[in-house]
Image (cartoon, rainbow, N blue to C red):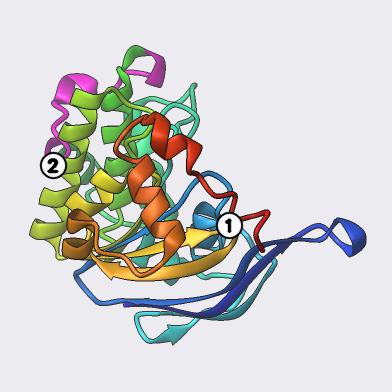
Amino acid sequence: MIEASDLTVTFGHGASLVLAVRGVSFTVAAGSSFGLVGESGSGKSTVLNALSGLHDHWEGSVVIAGEPQGRCRNKAFHRRVQMVFQDPYGSLHPRHTVDRIVSEPMIIHALGDIDDRVERVLREVGLGPEFRFRFPHQLSGGQRQRVAIARAIALEPTILLLDEPTSALDVSVQAEILNLLARLRRERGLTYLLVSHNLAVVAHMCEHVAVMNRGLIVEEVAAADLRAGRFADAYTRQLFSASKGYDRAAADALIDFAASE
């Protein structure tokens, strides 16, 4: 469903040029969930922005559902591919009601039966009719993210790009949102590309995981190997160790992979 080949993303020009993503390649099968993990600044969110069309300074090849993609995307692409962002407050217009936030994509794409569609997707994400005409500031963080997910599925896409969808939420709410996303994928046959720095989240949600460091994919593993801690790359082993929590001995043994390049 998703094929990225030799994807390279840059920022700036000349002496200030930054290679944010360096020759990344991976594939995501239809109906599966694929994870991109790595520390902050590793380039994983930049990959999502290039795939979604939000960032157009990229080279390489992007193929979605068998169709090669250029830097400009058409309406058909955006019906097929939707994105859920990290910040459930910043991604929602503060002066728009939930009704307008969810219905606006439907209006843009000239869908019919908008009232019924809005009610249906809100029910799917666990929000009753009493939430329909509230504003984002009247909602909790988890409720806002449910609205963002409702907006994403409103056009009945086949692919969701998920950029740290639970990192801004309390731990108990994170579990609710992850269970919601898992149910939607199962019921709708969706394909997920999930970005996270949380290895436990990715191991729970994804069948395969690519580990990124400084714009490169250093290793690709199955979720079963991630849960068991079976890795070939030293950076992946260090990332896995760090994910277990603070340990003085492990902290003292940390390697600066940027400095070792």
- Where residue 1 appears, as percent x and y from the top left, is 31, 77
Disc 2, SS:
helix
Kindly report the distance in space between the C-alpha atoms of the residues bearing marks 2 and 1.
Answer: 27 Å
Q: Do we see residue 208 in this rendering?
A: yes
Name of the residue lying farthest toward the top: 138
- The label shown at residue 54 is 1
Question: Which of the pair 77/183 is nearer the observer?
Answer: 183
Asked if residue 3 lies left or right of residue 189, the reply is right
Q: Do we see residue 116 in this rendering?
A: no
Q: Amino acid at mark 2?
A: Asn
Name of the residue lying farthest toward the right: 15
Q: Amino acid at mark 1?
A: Leu
Disc 1, SS:
loop
Mark in front: 2 vs 1: 2
Q: Residue at left 15%, top 42%?
A: 180
What residue range appears in magenta? 123-137
Q: Residue at left 34%, top 45%?
A: 241
Q: Which residue is mark 2?
A: 179
